[in-house]
Amino acid sequence: MLDKRKFYINGEWVEPAAQNDLYVLNPATEKPIAVISLGTAVDIDRAVAAAKKAFQSYSRTGLEERLALLEKLLAIYKRRYDEMADTITAELGAPKTMSREQQADVGVGHLQGYIDALKRLKLREKLPNGDTLMREPIGVCGLITPWNWPINQIALKVVPALATGCTCVLKPSEFTPLNALLYAEMIDEAGFPAGVFNLVNGDGLHAGAALSKHKDIDMMSFTGSTRAGIAVSKDAADTVKRVTLELGGKSPNIVFADADLEARVTAGVLECFNNSGQSCDAPTRMLVERSAYNDVVAIARRIGREAEVGDPAKEGSHIGPLVSHIQYERVQALIEAGVGEGARLVVGGPGKPEGFETGYFVKPTIFADVDNSMRIAREEVFGPVLSIIPFDTEEEAIAIANDTSYGLAAYVQTGDPERAERVAARLRAGMVHINGGPHRYGSPFGGYKQSGNGREGGTFGLEDFLEVKTVHLPDAA
Ligand code: NAD
């Protein structure tokens, strides 16, 4: 078992202020694979002090210097890529192939996306009225990340902080801390000055809250549940810091009868199940035009039955376990709520798949005849659970799609490009995917409504970490 109890503060691996061990479990075996420390406010204080001191000089480094450091980090990440993929498989339970092709890959994509955006960033510009506008690093940033796409969210926060000349303290999820510790090793090797990047492990209520409340933190960037995002906002309010939030989702996938049903319904089911359904932007509500409804349910049933659950340590396109016992219980409760509220079970259901008694495995599950008022249509399940809902008109589809407290992503499937544009414009969501259009690195990622504030990735992601200063010069004589 790995001993990973140290924190990375001021360019060194240091002992925590108090001993408070937590075991990191492999979700497929339920066995401990590492021990970490849960940090306290004392550890957070120490890390923030280091970041505050480092900000004095790092904030004045030039763009070229920071670009060179980021390029170095990219080369190191590529060299240690397989270690990153294996770590994510071990602590999250993402199957080996998925970890390599998706989970670890985003670490490269986002870093490259930010490097490209940084090269285009205008730090100083003349406004049409003659004033000068300057963009400057906001200061010391507190970064809190979840477990579901661990290095994705770490890269989306750490990289823009380092790119813009900010300094930071990262508190990753206590369920998946090992990929974050590996990233800290990479940042150390890249040669960022001491104190620019710091890492303290811990839970939300102690280390997380201490960070949000800290008077010397200028900005909090948070990704996680809407519940915790609200707590971070409240904790940050007394010190009036900037808060950016990437929260949950309950994304609609509108399937019109004129879509390529076989291809688009297959893709919709597989996207919902990807990462064991643990994606904030997963298309979990499939809204289907009534005239195609029976055909769509039949395709979904076939694809759902074919979806295999399997050992994450093996290569393949199978689905791994959920991350933890807590998530397992939560997903089971929602599957049972779906049955209880009268949705029609098409595939899967409560309980563990046969042969997977150990590990947090669940059955890929599809419900049809779901009403948008049911819990499975309103709450983020965060498991491989799809709800199929019929609609009669375009207007009704838009109304059901928008009838949610979330607004992260939306998906539209249609053979009519004009309808695609028309519907996309009416959806209250931060990202609309049409007929499988993917999210590309460098584009803003984020949501409307209770899915959050702010955007990550590319130029928009950099701007969240920048303050704006207007310099007023006297009129020329
Ligand atoms: P979570 O909110 O329980 O935890 C996320 C992080 O916040 C963890 O590091 C946790 O320790 C910390 N935390 C918890 N309570 C806190 C508090 N009161 N103060 C400060 N920090 C606190 O979420 P999770 O279960 O780790 O992740 C799943 C959630 O994340 C889902 O709701 C998912 O939709 C969301 N998510 C959103 C995006 C996005 O970009 N919109 C991306 C990925 C995940």
Image: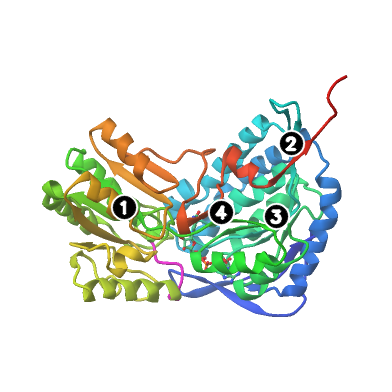
The image quarter containing residue 366 is: bottom left
Closer to the chain start, of discs 1 and 4, is: 4
Q: Is residue 367 left or right of residue 165?
A: left
Give the Cα separation between the discs numbered 2 and 1: 44 Å
In the rendering, at what x and y percent does residue 253 appear?
Answer: 30, 49
Find the residue positioned furthest to the top: 477
Say which of 57 and 81 sits in front: 57
In the rendering, at what x and y percent does residue 114 appear?
Answer: 62, 39
Residue tagged 3: 185
Q: Pointer 2 and pointer 1: residues touching (CB < 8 Å)? A: no
Query: The residue tagged with tag 3: helix, strand or loop?
Result: helix
Badge nearest the viewer, 2 or 1: 1
Q: Is mark 4 within 8 Å of ligand 1?
A: yes
Highlighted range, magenta: 320-325
Badge nearest the viewer, 4 or 3: 4
Q: Pointer 4 and pointer 3: residues touching (CB < 8 Å)? A: no
Badge nearest the viewer, 2 or 3: 2
**Amino acid at dot 4:** Gln
Give the Cα separation between the discs numbered 2 and 3: 18 Å
Mark 2 burial class by Cα count in 10 Å: few <14, some 14-19, many 20+: few
Quarter of the rendering occupied by the N terminus: bottom right
The image quarter containing residue 34 is: bottom right
State the predominant SS element of the stretch in magenta.
loop
Q: Which mark is residue 401?
A: 1
**Amino acid at dot 3:** Glu
Badge nearest the viewer, 3 or 1: 1
Mark 1 burial class by Cα count in 10 Å: few <14, some 14-19, many 20+: many
